[in-house]
Amino acid sequence: MKIAFIGGGNMGEAMVSAILDKGLAKPEAIWVSDISEARLKHLEQKYGVAVTGSNRQAAERGEVVVLAIKPQNLTEVMAELNGQLKPAQLVLSIIAGARINTLSPGLKHGCIVRVMPNTPAQIGEGMSVWTATAEVTEQQRGWAGAILGTMGKEIYVDDERYIDMATA
């Protein structure tokens, strides 16, 4: 599977590291975009992944597009990616507080997984609670579960409000 990360901060890096450590993907199958040139250089040197300053360029390469940005950057990133994603691409959002009813119209995309990993996920001991839109296929649910499983345990819930409860 090819994975694009929009955002290469602490949580994005933790996910890249876990995915590579567990052998879920090879470095050449991972793209990371970030606004910080220093972060991109660090990720490229440490993990051997492809990096870019362009969110669109990264996103077009992923079967899974992980949104790993700060909530305050969401509006800008959604505007940049709005209508740019292919229907078959899975968006996996780890953005705190970003609900599906914001992400889907903001991206003009229906195939979305929302997850709230907790801090121990950064060391592979986390608990990630996640949900998916009806458009997400069984294969894509498998991808989401596999990605999240590299960071610890993962639990699927069929109602997004349980994510909010789990993080309260």
Image (spheres, rainbow, N blue to C red):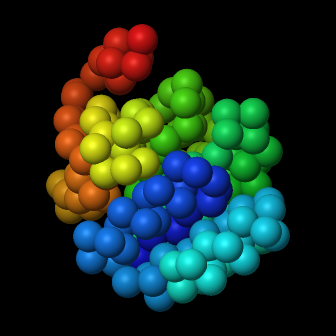
Residue at horizontal 67%, vertical 39%? Answer: 70
Q: Position of residue 102 (x, y in %)?
A: 59, 30
Write down the quadrant of residue 133 in the picture.
top left
Comparing 125 with 59, the one in front is: 125
Question: Where is 26 relative to 98, above or below?
Answer: below
Residue at (56, 78) in percent of width and height? 46
Q: For the point 32% across and 72% down, which residue is it? A: 21
Residue 148 locus on image (x, y percent):
30, 51
Q: Residue at x 76, y 55 (%)?
A: 80
Is residue 161 visible to us here? Answer: no
In the figure, residue 64 lies in which quadrant?
A: bottom left
- In the image, 57: left or right of 4? right
Compared to residue 68, the image places residue 98 above or below, namely above
For the C terminus, the image quarter is top left
Q: Quadrant of the N terminus?
A: bottom left
Q: Is residue 159 left or right of residue 74?
A: left
Taking the image as shown, residue 155 lies to the left or right of residue 129, namely left
Residue 44, position as x, y percentages in the image: 62, 80
- Res. 78 visible in picture: yes
Query: Residue 165 in the image: x percent, y percent?
Result: 35, 12
Report the number of numbered marks: 0
